[in-house]
Image (cartoon, rainbow, N blue to C red):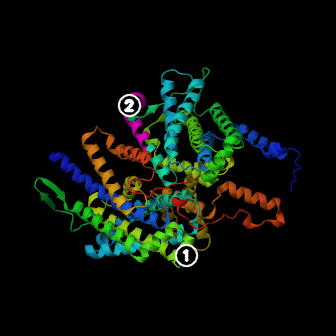
Amino acid sequence: MLDFIQQLVSGIALGCVYGLIALGFVLIYKATEVVNFAQGDLMMLGGFFVFTFIGLMGLDYWLGFLFAVCGMAVFGMATERILIRPILGYPQFSIVMATIGLGYFLRSIAGMIWGTDDLKIETPFSAGVVRIGDLVLAHDKLSVIVATVILCAVLFAFFNYTRLGTAMRATSENMLAAYYMGIPVKRVVSLIWAISAAVAATAGVLLAPITFIHSNVGLALGLKAFPAAVLGGFGSIPGAVVGGLIIGVIETLAGFYLPQGWKDVMPYIVLLVVLLIRPQGLFGPSMRKKV
Amino acid sequence: MRFIFKTDYDQDIRILKHSGYWWSYGILLAVMVATPYVLGSYMQSQLVFVFIYAIVGVALMILTGFTGQASLGHAAFLAIGAYTAGFMQSLGVPFIVYFPLAAVLTGVVGALVGFPALRLHGIYLVIATIAFAFIVEEVLARWESVTHGNEGMRVRTLDLFDIPIPRDSDAFYFLCLLVLVGVSVLALNLLRSPTGRAFIAIRDSETAGKSMGIDLAAYKVKSFAISAAITGMAGVLFAHKMTFISPEMFTLLLSIEFIMVIIIGGAFGVHGAIFGAIFIVMVDPFLTALKDDVPVLVSSIASSLGMAKETATDLRDDLSRIGSAAGLKGAIYGLIIMMFILFEPYGLYGRWLKVKLFFQLFPLYKRATFKRQKTYVKSERNR
């Protein structure tokens, strides 16, 4: 039984990692209905930024964290301006391919600049564990869980209770109508890319002690975070985190109880089953077409 | 400029619309038949890969370009075709039997994937096909009695009516060419039939298609099945060309490469698939050649322009260091995808058509003819 709980807890920690990356997917989707396949790679880049600030320039952890997040926000804005804005409004799949291309590009460039070794930074969460009874939880994983919960709550409130959040939802519904209502659509889209890249950077910094910083880390985690976002329903912020938790817990439990090999496919099998039953994901708004 | 005097309704749907087509495609075919006797074995081998990629490109073109259903799982279909070939051959089944059998089997699997596609669209479909591809990859790695797992499987030389056709022979080249031509004709015929029209209607608007009486479910499944079956055929040829197959050859990256084929070529015609395949297969040897030649060339130009000898040598070394950096190929791939989507959305075939039209209408060509219609973004939820 203790085994089970311990596995469950580490599954939840892993799930929060996926959820944190999935949040970035969902944000952009929610505001522009664009799917950003390079989200994992933005996270990877955030990790490298913080390595540059802390590991190479020797800044304080929190200062480096702040710089990395701000740097990535600017980077996200620039990406939107250069790559996404010219093709906004074309078929969704061409935008997906453009972001896949962006992912390829960022991975290679990061590998060329920072090398292909696993990099590490010293963080306040690196050592130390929390013990609850016989349960053991490392500080770095706890930091991910706490950050996910906080970010999820803040973003949820932002989208539902602020004027800007409402403007973003309106933009996703119909850009032309939103523009007529006086919403500065271009600025809103830029802003959402900045926020999404900042969330990705946060994930990258918090994951740095767990997964290390490596140019391929974004691809591997992104490919798991993506099903998480779909599972939760792409447009839903709590859905992203719940989806992440489900994927994380299933993956950990499958790795522990099922024969080797099931660990990697089980999340996808669950995803397919859920999509068969509820094509819009668990929390997604229902998409009904009338003919 | 050519004026075609139409006397018959059938003229509009003919594959070879006028005598010019007979000439140009006849010459192209003659060139392709003569090629193995002219080119070296390396280029011939590259051409075989072009053919295989083009077959997959045609398959994806039918599914993505004409039915509008995105798939990032075609590497899995290729794998199923390849492994069917390898397994059947090891049981002693002749090529003439397992080649169609692989196509049928892959087609059935494709139809099964098509069923969820009835309810999913857009991004949900993309992720479902990715999930399918991951599951297939894992099954191939674990089902050791059939696939030999991660150790991979050796595929013996192709045997057609007791005549061995090794992977480097002219006969293998002609076999691939034959399959590509056959598949292209099949695709062209399909797309001018009622089925093909229904596919296009589904792509343009499911709602409109359905109100015109198109059975969405049946046609989507058909499109998936046909696309998968063609990819399965390519898989058989791929297995025999590689002579060794293992699960890690059929990853997501291969699926992305296949999508690149139709994006770069242009997703609205068989020509596009072939142009894209040529581009994707040839970009690698081209880059390798550039890597060796460009630094030398640049430094010799620089020194002839009066640069000091040491600086020129340094420049050459710097350039070749950048050229041989580990991830350069990925960066260039990514850049190519982004550039094509931004600046050449109709792909190489679109550029070809534009140039052709420019000369046909010489002083009267208008750039707006090919302007993409840009709409503001509306939610898919309400579409």
Image quadrant containing the C terminus of chain B: bottom right
| B97 in relation to A194, above or below | above
Nearer-the-camera pick, A46 or B284: A46
Residue B137 part of the magenta segment:
yes
Can you see residue B150?
no
Task: Say if labels 2 and 1 share a chain.
Answer: no
Look at label 2 and name its amino acid. Glu
In the image: residue B169, left or right of residue A241:
right
How much space separates mark 2 and mark 1, taking CA atoms? 58 Å
Tag 2 subunit: B
Q: Residue at x 51, y 54 (%)?
A: A288
Q: Is residue B26 left or right of residue A282?
A: right
Residue projecting furthest to the bottom:
A182
Task: Tell me where residue B164 appears, x and y as whole percent.
Answer: 59, 24
Q: The residue tagged with tag 2: helix, strand or loop?
A: helix
Amino acid type, callout 1: Tyr
Which type of secondary structure does the marked residue at label 1 adopt?
Answer: helix
